[in-house]
Amino acid sequence: METDLKATKEEDKKEKLKTARRILLKLNDEEKELVDHALKECARCWNDIVDIANEYYKETGRWIYKYDLQKLLKHKYDIQYNSCCALTIKYNTARLIASKMKKQGFSKIKYPYKYKEYMTLPLKKDCIRKAKDGNLKLSLGGHKYLLLNFFIDNIKTAEIKRTYSDKYYFYYTKEYEYENCDNNLTQKAGIDIGYNNCIALCHENGNALIIDNKPAKSIKKRRNKSRFYLSNAIKKCTYGSKKYKKLLAASENIQIYSHNFLTDFYHKAVNQMIKYCIDNGIGELVIGDLKNISDKSKKKEKICNKICRIWVSQMEYGRIMKYIEYKSKEYGIKVSKVAEYYTSLQCPRCKVLNKPDGSKYKCNYCGLMAHRDCVGAFNNLNKKYKVEYHGFDINFIAIK
Ligand SMILES: [Zn+2]
């Protein structure tokens, strides 16, 4: 019986997808005052949480339970009690993450200690309602309501946030169900994920989309180079000295910067691809499965030289794949995988294997010339659905 329950739970998880979005709020002065008051109350609540938790820790040597915190905070603030509870949960997770990081050796990490002037206002499901005019109505506590000029269905949780530039954003998470996704996307396309071009897409009618990977490549190059120099310099320093700490921080900063840049870049790249799919009526994507390619490339060390291995390890196949999978599900686009064998070698017209040179593909048998990644994408598609080759019409896209 228990296993049945578990199975259904897992199925539920598979079918639903959580997405987070934000909307810029255009508020008049009156509404701004209302929201500011709530955010300040939130900040007061948060500051008290930080104080109480720290004092409790000093006295007892243990962290306070969140339920005890919630009892202490009840009816003290001019916001919904739900929002208070959400803040304690927020504090708890921040503290747990900090302690986890400390265990991993990040000694700089501190437990939450900062006092806030404005704090993000968390809104639980009960605080979000539908007003009489059909728009959203947010309960800010103390019988005060904020009326918005739009409506979104099935919101799970939401937040109101004030940025440093005095803008107000409404953040919300929502669950999607795939089964209800009806669309008229019927065409098919193949996809090749690579190093020189992060995504190459080939439509069954021959139209192709190629997204350049240059920004990601250059940032990776810079990161690797500077981290190499820094790690050499760190080795020469005495452990724990001022210079040592400075270099270590610089190395960490480079890592964080490049990570953020790459995340942003790949999100944009995949979004562009999905947009292209919807515009062209593509409802199924066939992707070459490169799972465990880096393991294989280590084993076949003699065949795969060092540069090739570095290429494969820096291609980030898994990350792009993950983005494609979840973003396409949102629009009801199917994703299927095929084993990627010789897909970049086979000639799309006469099916003879050729060794490509650089980014160009040339067939020695029939003389066909084409873009190499396009050929890969076409062959991936051809593995699942037999498609005839009519030449490629390529769109190049660069992401800034
Ligand atoms: Zn050929």
Image (cartoon, rainbow, N blue to C red):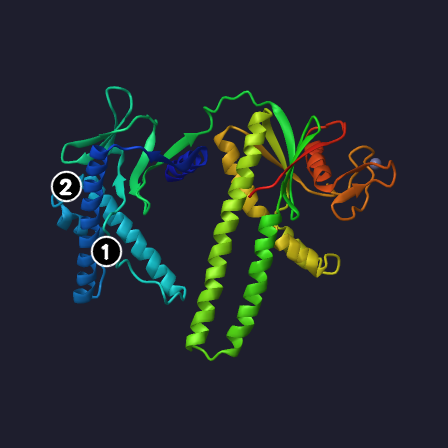
Residue 199 placement (x, y as % from top left): 62, 41
Would you say 176 lies left or right of 371 here?
Answer: left
Q: Earlier in the sequence, mark 2 or mark 1?
A: 2
Location of ligand 1 given as a quarter of the image: top right
- Does mark 1 have its CB less than 8 Å from ligand 1? no
Instruction: Rate crowding at label 1 as few (under 14), some (14 to 19) or many (20 or more) other CA atoms within 10 Å.
Output: some
Would you say 77 lies left or right of 228 here?
Answer: left
Question: At x 20% / y 31%, what residue is drawn?
Answer: 145
Amino acid type of disc 1? Tyr
The correct choice, above or below, for 244 with respect to 86 in the image is below
Disc 2 and disc 1 in contact, CB within 8 angstroms: no
Q: Which element is circle 2 on? A: loop
Q: Is residue 154 visible?
A: yes
Amino acid type of disc 2? Asp
**Residue projecting furthest to the left:** 75
Residue 176 placement (x, y as % from top left): 42, 31
Question: At x 32% / y 26%, what residue is drawn?
Answer: 150
In terms of depth relative to the viewer, which is nearer, 263 or 92? 263
Question: At x 47% / y 26%, what residue is drawn?
Answer: 179
Q: Is residue 67 visible?
A: no
Q: Which picture quadrant has residue 308?
A: bottom right
Q: Which element is circle 1 on? A: loop
Quadrant position of the C terminus in the picture:
top right
In terms of depth relative to the viewer, which is nearer, 9 or 313? 313
Instruction: Rate crowding at label 2 as few (under 14), some (14 to 19) or many (20 or more) other CA atoms within 10 Å.
Output: some
Residue identified by numbered label 2: 78
In terms of depth relative to the viewer, which is nearer, 270 or 338? 270
Residue 177 placement (x, y as % from top left): 43, 29
Question: At x 33% / y 45%, what residue is drawn?
Answer: 165
Residue identified by numbered label 1: 115
